[in-house]
Amino acid sequence: MNNINFSSYPLSDVILKAISDLGYEIPTPVQQQVIPAVLAGNDVLVQSQTGSGKTASFGIPLCEKVDWIENKPQILVLEPTRELAQQVQEDLINIGRYKRIKATAVYGKASYVKQKSELKQKSHIVVGTPGRVLDHIIKGSLPLEKINCLVIDEADEMLNMGFIDQVKEIIAALPKMKNTLLFSATMPQTIERMSNAYLHEPIVVKIEATEKTTPKIQHAFLDTTDENKLNALEAVTIMENPDTCIIFANTQEKVNVTYDFLVKAGYPVGKLHGGMMQEDRFDVMDAFRKAKFRYLVATDVAARGIDIENITHVINLDIPYEKESYIHRVGRTGRAGKEGFALTFVTPKEGALKREIETFGELTMTQITLPNAKLVARSKSAFEAKITTKQKIKQPKAKRVNEEITKVYFNGGKKKKLRALDFVGTISKIEGITAEDIGIITIQENVTYIDILNGKGQLVIQAMKERTIKGKQLKVHVARKK
Ligand code: AMP
């Protein structure tokens, strides 16, 4: 087992290079089972937690199998939340970077028209939330005839969020699948029934919790009342002085109130809930991931699957209504073998709910008591020193893959009747550039973005200032945003 590395699999050089740039050396246990199974064309039913490398376990073989020439989507990936859809899209783009795979994400509360225009272009893989995917299917903007693989990710969460009927509706609209891959952290009966109905002789992969996949989390609870929660939160955070902490509340209103309280108290803090604009949600996630602030107050939208490294503390300001949510929330800490601390505030009426969670999660929460004022005061200077010190900005994991890539902007697109071939034709004639250096091309109404690979962005920009495309002189510079 230990001798396995990614080059043991029949993967092409462009995929292996991207994997190596991402810093993956040894396939994780789930990858060791899923990659060969999917490459061989089997259906898989995978029970595995997030953090186990499961996205790459399907991303790698599926990017390998994509037929680049085909313009219509070949793979559909369903995710329960917009954040996950975006994260998985990014992961797939990173894995498929050198193969120039185009992965498009579609989710609610974002421009339908923009997504429709993206889907009209070459899109090898579509990642989306069930509601919006269904919307695109019904309105005819997501062609299904070439889809040959369906990935249902986080199936138990789809179930919890009430998306299962939409998932079934999507499946009914799809052509006969060559491959269906189903991933779930838990296997409730409904998911098993789905597997029986839609998967064909699947290879069943169950990753037993091991040292590496079981987070080392210390669970604790604190008896408190609703009125006292914010003061208790302040005392606890001063004592604990976490490096990074997510605070979960059950409602958007509670998130807002808690966030305002912490801002006033001088905490470096962000907030995240479903009522915020999609762009703002992404910006907050991105800033938190880059360690621009230490505290994030969130509703359950942030709980599931989101891959942020090194969260040291999770505090449930409100005990979650659903016992499954507890597992997902605390799963944000204790990742990759690191230790984590999960503290839940319990009000007098919530004892039964706490016990239910303990039974369900096979865990015991240790009681902690509120530190007295003297102790809090003594800890305050260390706490203040930390919250006023800026953290080192973390580079996102995609950085290395992107390093050699420059996104280049041109001020012309469909309206000027420009097509990908026109760009490729002109750019590949530049001395020192071949078609291999040209990555994903996104043509919009009035602008075009092209990824130039292998550190040759500036070369292309300089050369294109002197050249025309289809007789048209275009403005060209490094793109500001994707
Ligand atoms: P996931 O379970 O997909 O959320 O992945 C958890 C984390 O593991 C992500 O940050 C991945 O980038 C990372 N990862 C996935 N596969 C590997 C690997 N083979 N080696 C190291 N890290 C990996």
Image (cartoon, rainbow, N blue to C red):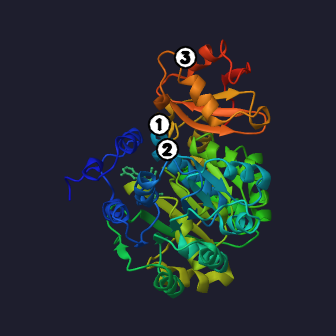
Residue located beneath label 3 in the image:
459
Residue located beneath label 1 in the image:
401
Marker disc for residue 94: 2
Nearest to the eye among marks 2 and 3: give it. 3
- Label 1 near label 2: C-beta < 8 Å? yes
Q: What is the three-letter code of the residue carrying label 1?
A: Val
**Total residue callouts:** 3
Residue 320 in view: no
Inter-mark Cα distance, 1 to 3: 19 Å
Element under disc 1: helix
Inter-mark Cα distance, 2 to 3: 23 Å
Element under disc 3: helix
Q: What is the three-letter code of the residue carrying label 2?
A: Asn
Q: Is residue 414 above or below residue 312?
A: above
Q: Position of residue 285 (x, y in %)?
A: 64, 49
- Label 3 near label 1: C-beta < 8 Å? no
Q: Tell me what residue is drawn at x 45 percent, y 76 percent.
A: 364
Q: Nearer the viewer, residue 106 or 295?
A: 106
Q: Is residue 384 left or right of residue 362?
A: right
Q: Residues within 10 Å of mark 2 (few under 14, many from 20)?
A: many
